[in-house]
Amino acid sequence: MATELEAARALLWRAATALDRGDPRAPQLCAMAKRYATDTGFEVANQALQLHGGYGYLAEYGIEKIVRDLRVHQILEGTNEIMRVIVARGLTGAA
């Protein structure tokens, strides 16, 4: 789980750097980072919830809120399906 989060973090930093520098690939990298970070975050949070068993659903543990919030982030600012389309267009040169 830690490895997946670190990989997501690295892609996020790469996309942010590209955006700051005005790199023409920035939109594609940002779409990749958004899609990967939210999907990875959701999977890791879901695994953490599983590790806690039934207690993972209790509000006092906080994991259920993280799972819920990450699911919303997969939809906000463009669904992850749209992020995949942006990446595909960048790879194929389609505008």
Image (tube, helix red, strand yellow):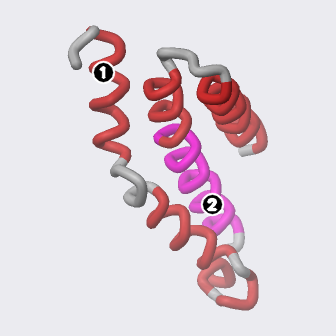
Residue 59 image point, x, y percent: 66, 89
Nearer to the camera, 13 or 48: 13
Residue type, numbered disc 2: Ala
Q: Quadrant of residue 88?
A: top left
Nearer to the camera, 78 or 20: 20
Q: Quadrant of residue 70?
A: bottom right
Magenta stretch holds residue 50: yes
Residue 27 image point, x, y percent: 45, 28
- Residue drawn at 61 percent across, 78 percent down: 65
Q: Is residue 64 above or below residue 87?
A: below
Nearer to the camera, 42 or 32: 32
Residue 29 image point, x, y percent: 52, 25
Assign the C terminus to one quadrant of the image: top left
Number of other residues with Cα within 10 Å of mark 2, as a class: few under 14, some 14 to 19, many 20 or more: many
- Residue drawn at 27 percent across, 9 percent down: 92
Question: Which comes before the other along the chain, label 1 or label 2?
Answer: 2
Q: Is residue 14 left or right of residue 42?
A: right
Q: Name the front one of labels 1 and 2.
A: 1
Query: Mark 2 — residue?
Result: 45
- Residue drawn at 63 percent across, 60 percent down: 45
> Magenta residues?
35-51
Q: Is residue 29 above or below residue 9?
A: above
Assign the N terminus to one quadrant of the image: top right
Q: Residue furthest front?
A: 22
Query: Mark 1 — residue?
Result: 88
Residue type, numbered disc 1: Ala
Q: Secondary structure at mark 2?
A: helix
